């Protein structure tokens, strides 16, 4: 039987990049998925491509009402067994170039969005007999990251929030883990100049950038019963960049 048969998973930022790769793998393994994102055209196109196992909704992770709608959509599809807090923004600026508005924008999407999401899914996961939450942090949450003070702050926060939530939710049958990707070939890193890209590559022992599917496979492991005794853990998927 397929590993995710009968399971429903909600993925934020699911219209493209790593979220889309996770959706494809999950559906291939028998799951039904709810894709939340601000990008309506791409999100709807992906849901159409994936067929009846996928539904898209326009969701802003900073808005509580949007979370309620996403959870309701999942329950209408058969419950809620997994959730990936994948939505994120990355507008890299050094400390002295970052203003309060940019700092707060990162906090709202990357950090508050994750908090609201973990809170929103708990009752539905309990009704489904337990669940697994995966928070997408970054190697920027494991060590210093150049020229991205606001982003780094939120990704370190996710690491701590994951452990705090893992403690709170273990008695409720919900596991919470974080994934820490290194540089991954998605739209997000298109902001880098060639020189920045070369500099990032030089820090990766495996000598290459990662692909979205390589992160998606790790996320599926944490969503699945294969990781049934893991909670509060942090999994780096980074070609050795944090060694
Ligand atoms: N690409 C990398 O190198 C890299 C490295 C480490 C961690 N990450 C993290 O991985 C996650 C996925 O990023 P990606 O690489 O697929 O990039 P991406 O930019 O393709 O995907 C991010 C998605 O989040 C969505 N999003 C942004 N703000 C939102 C909001 N307020 N509400 C709902 N959706 C919103 C975007 O529309 C987009 O679809 C992010 O959390 C990112 O920080 C990426």
Image (tube, grey):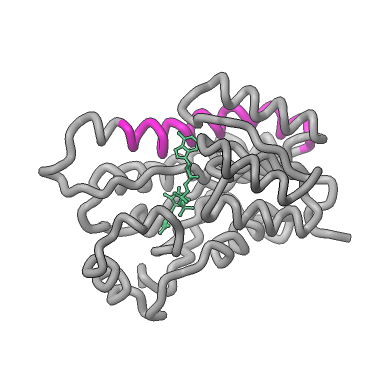
Residue 160 placed where, x, y %?
41, 44
Task: Decide if residue 200 is on the left or right side of residue 185.
Answer: left
Q: Could you tell me which residue is drawn at 50 percent across and 60 percent down?
A: 235
Residue drawn at x 36%, y 72% as measured from the top left? 243
Which quadrant would residue 180 be assigned to in this image? bottom left
Most foreground residue, 37 or 227: 37
Front position in the image: 41 or 94: 41
Numbered range of the magenta stretch:
105-129
Split into 4 quadrants, where in the image is the N terminus? Answer: bottom right
Residue 165 seen in this snapshot? yes
Tell me if residue 118 is in the magenta stretch.
Answer: yes
Where residue 120 appears, as percent x and y from the top left, is: 60, 27
Q: Residue at (41%, 63%) from the top-left corner?
A: 182
**Main SS class of the magenta portion in the image:** helix
Q: Is residue 158 above or below residue 207?
A: above
Query: Is 188 within the magenta?
Result: no
Q: Position of residue 192 (x, y in %)?
A: 28, 60
Please report the residue visible at 60 percent of the width from the left and 42 percent of the height from the top: 43
């Amino acid at each position: 039987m397929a590993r995710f048969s009968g399971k429903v998973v909600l993925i934020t930022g699911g219209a493209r990049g790593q979220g889309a790769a996770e959706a494809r793998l999950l559906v291939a393994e028998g799951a039904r998925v709810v894709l939340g994102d601000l990008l309506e055209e791409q999100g709807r196109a992906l849901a159409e491509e994936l067929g009846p196992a996928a539904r898209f909704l326009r969701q802003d992770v900073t808005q509580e009402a949007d979370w309620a709608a996403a959870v309701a959509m999942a329950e209408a599809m058969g419950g809620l067994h997994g959730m990936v807090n994948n939505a994120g923004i990355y507008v890299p600026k050094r400390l002295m170039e970052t203003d309060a508005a940019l700092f707060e924008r990162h906090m709202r999407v990357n950090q508050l969005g994750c908090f609201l999401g973990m809170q929103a899914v708990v009752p539905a996961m309990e009704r489904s007999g337990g669940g697994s939450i995966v928070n997408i942090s970054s190697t920027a949450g494991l060590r210093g990251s150049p020229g991205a003070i606001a982003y780094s702050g939120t990704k370190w926060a996710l690491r701590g929030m994951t452990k705090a939530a893992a403690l709170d939710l273990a008695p409720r049958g919900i596991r919470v883990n974080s994934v820490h990707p290194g540089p991954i070939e998605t739209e997000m890193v298109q902001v880098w100049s060639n020189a920045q890209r070369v500099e990032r590559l030089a820090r990766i022992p495996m000598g290459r950038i990662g692909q979205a599917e390589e992160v998606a496979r790790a996320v599926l492991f944490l969503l699945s019963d294969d990781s049934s005794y893991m909670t509060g853990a942090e999994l780096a998927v980074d070609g050795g960049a944090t060694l």
